[in-house]
Amino acid sequence: MKLPILSLGHMILKERCENINQDYPNLGKLIADMWETMQNANGCGLAASQVGQPIRLFIVDSKSTYENLDEAERKEYFDTNDKGIMETFINAQIIECSERCWEDKEGCLSIPDLSQSVKRPWTITIEYYTKDFEKQFRTFNATTARMIQHEYDHTDGILFLDHLEPLTKKLMESKLKRIIKGQIKPKYPMKFL
């Protein structure tokens, strides 16, 4: 089922989310609905808080991004032998980040039609549970690491806007107000204030 995505302005997007256990009610359905919602919105990631659930759960699809790039772009945005992932992350904790950082544009399904450059570590090591509650300890690089960090931020109540310089945010202020008020027409279901 496609769920409405909460727009910028909803306070749940600024909350630190709670860990869950495998007995969380209707967890399998929520995860399936999140995948359907994200794919319908042509997204590459979605956090549970964006659909109104303040829990440490997010999904990432860097595989579709990889498949839509040409060979030269793949070399720029993905490490060798990395063809992307389609993964569910539950109770994730980033354990380590590389000193090497890079900037690239990011957008957010809760903030439609806006993107800005955000500086993030190139490599992260993360501990998490899969949808089947199997514990994982993995290292990701480049675009996949960026997508994970973006969604992970959501579980801490952080939006990509929070990484921007004050002047950059000031220049976007009128667009952000229009999004909060629902004065936009996204191509996917959203819930505005």
Image: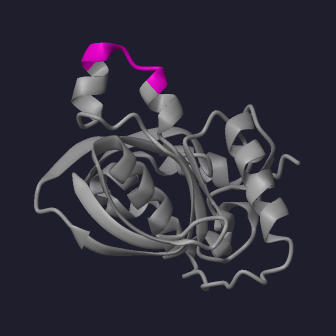
Q: In the figure, is residue 189 to the left or right of 78?
A: right
Residue 29 in the image: above or below residue 86: below
Look at the image and name its color scheme.
one colour
Position in image of residue 146 (x %, y %): 35, 50
Q: In the figure, is residue 122 to the left or right of 38?
A: left
- Picture quadrant of residue 10: bottom right
Position in image of residue 88 (x %, y %): 59, 59
Boundaries of the magenta span: 67-72
Q: In the figure, is residue 140 to the left or right of 91?
A: left
Name the residue nearer the viewer: 161 or 75.
Answer: 75
- Picture quadrant of residue 22: bottom right
Can residue 160 be seen here? no
Q: Residue furthest left?
A: 99
Residue 11 in the image: above or below residue 31: below
Name the residue nearer the viewer: 110 or 179.
Answer: 110
> Which residue does the image show at 38% across and 54% down from the upper left?
169
Q: In the figure, is residue 63 to the left or right of 121?
A: right
Position in image of residue 149 (x %, y %): 39, 60
> Which residue does the image show at 78% across and 53% down from the upper left?
32
Can residue 45 be seen here? yes
Name the residue nearer the viewer: 112 or 51.
Answer: 51
Is residue 146 covered in magenta? Answer: no
Q: Number of labelled discs?
A: 0
Task: Specify the quadrant that holds the C terminus.
Answer: bottom right
Position in image of residue 26 (x %, y %): 86, 71
> Which residue does the image show at 49% across and 76% down from the upper left?
156
Residue 175 in the image: above or below residue 46: above
